[in-house]
Image: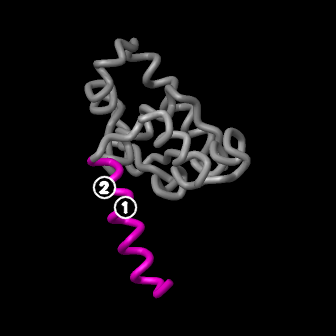
Amino acid sequence: MVKISDAELEVMKVIWEKKEVTSLEIINELKHCNWNDNTVRTLINRLIAKRAVGIAKREGKTYTYVPLIKENEYKLKRSKKFIKQIYNGSINDMILNFIDNKELSKSELDNIISSIDKETKKRGD
């Protein structure tokens, strides 16, 4: 799995959302981070070096960037790594920890229960 820092992940989120995006568009989307424009460009270049981002086209000095890694695949791998490190690989322990510490709202609990019910019916278990 490609190692992506928290700052690089903010850039990736914009690229995943937009599908094709210029550095100026990324800078504008990340104004809330209060980063210098050159910081964002450095993060983009790091992601290119890591082969997480590619250049789709170039028009003059303007580059259009695209994701080379899929968001869902990245999230799944990063989630599995987190669960393995923190909860010894037990999703059950993680969910119970959130429930026991009242970190999930009723709405979130209802959504989880609904998703489990749907998946159980699909599997016929």
* Magenta-tinted stretch: 107-125
Q: Is residue 124 magenta?
A: yes
Above/below status of 98 relative to 29: below
Residue 28 point in image, percent of width and height: 26, 25
Residue 86, by quadrant, is: top right
In the picture as drawn, the residue positioned furthest to the bottom comes out as 124
Overall secondary structure of the magenta stretch?
A: helix
Q: Which residue is mark 1?
A: 113
Residue 47 in which image quadrant: top right
User: Pointer 2: residues within 10 angstroms few (<14), some, or many (20+)?
Assistant: few
Give the camera-side residue of 80 and 107: 107
Q: Which residue is mark 2?
A: 110
Residue at image position (50%, 83%) is 125
What percent of the width, then of the height, locates residue 3? 65, 39
- The secondary structure type at the circle numbered 2 is helix
Residue 108 painted magenta:
yes
- Name the residue rendered at 44%, 16% in the picture: 38
Q: Who is closer to the viewer here, 67 or 13? A: 13
Q: Position of residue 97 (x, y in %)?
A: 55, 40
- Residue 104 as seen in the image, left or right of residue 88: left
Instruction: Find numbered disc 1 in the image and state the secondary structure of the residue it sits on.
Output: helix
Q: Are marks 2 and 1 in contact (CB under 8 Å)?
A: yes
Is residue 72 or residue 114 the one in the foreground?
A: 114
Relative vertical location of residue 5 with respect to residue 115 in this rendering, above or below:
above
Q: Position of residue 56 (x, y in %)?
A: 41, 51
Image: 112 above or below 47: below
Q: Nearer the viewer, residue 76 or 20?
A: 76
What amino acid type is highlighted by mark number 2? Asp
**Residue that lies at the very extreme toward the front in this rendered image:** 100
